[in-house]
Image (spheres, rainbow, N blue to C red):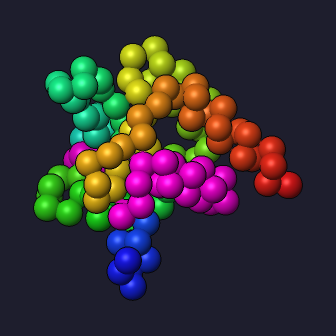
Amino acid sequence: MSNDPLIQYLEMDGEERYDYFLDAVVEEREVWILVNGDNHFLKIVSEEDSVSYLPVWPAEAFAVDYAKGTGDLAPKAISLPDFFKKWVPGLTRDGLEVGVFPGAQSELWITAPEELQRDLKEVLSGAF
């Protein structure tokens, strides 16, 4: 593994990144997404897997790294309460999944918004 902590996390497999994501988000109380100049969030449509998802990251640095070379995308924080109250119902209504912590590998943990919320709340309940 590299000495750069960012690279170390990005090289983890999907499940390891998912676990890291849960812990980091619970600690920081925010989820990071990418938005364009019009404040529209990045949505990825995978024709191959027939799934559309919102990619999310546990910290700004990971979102910035993912957006390198895109030019028009910028990181945006969503507080955990807002994510639970507004984003989970909205994503569910729109039929979007959540792509948790895209990394260097093509492997990605894609989950339903409600499942991610449940997992985050489970970690939250054990945090105190």
User: In percent of the image, x 15 and y 55: which residue is there?
Assistant: 70
Give how far across and how far down residue 38 sits, in percent: 24, 41
Magenta segment range?
10-37
Which quadrant of the figure contains the C terminus?
Answer: bottom right
Q: Is residue 95 above or below residue 63?
A: above
Q: Residue at x 21, y 29 (%)?
A: 46
In-front residue for pair 89/10:
10
Which residue is rendered at x = 57% and y = 52% of the image?
A: 19
Residue at the image position 35 percent from the left and 80 percent from the top: 2
Q: Answer with left or right where residue 40 lies relative to residue 69.
A: right
Measured as percent of width and height from the top left, residue 71 is found at 14, 58
Using the image, determine if residue 66 lies above or below residue 126: below
Q: Nearer the viewer, residue 59 or 4?
A: 4
Q: Nearer the viewer, residue 100 or 65?
A: 100
81 relative position to 20: left or right: right
Rendering coords of residue 32 (x, y %) = 45, 51
Inspect the magenta stretch and tell me whether residue 58 lies in it: no
- Residue 89, can we see it? yes
Q: Is residue 36 magenta?
A: yes
Q: Which residue in the rendered view is the most extreme toward the bottom? A: 3
Side of 10 where 120 appears, left or right: right
Q: Quadrant of the N terminus?
A: bottom left
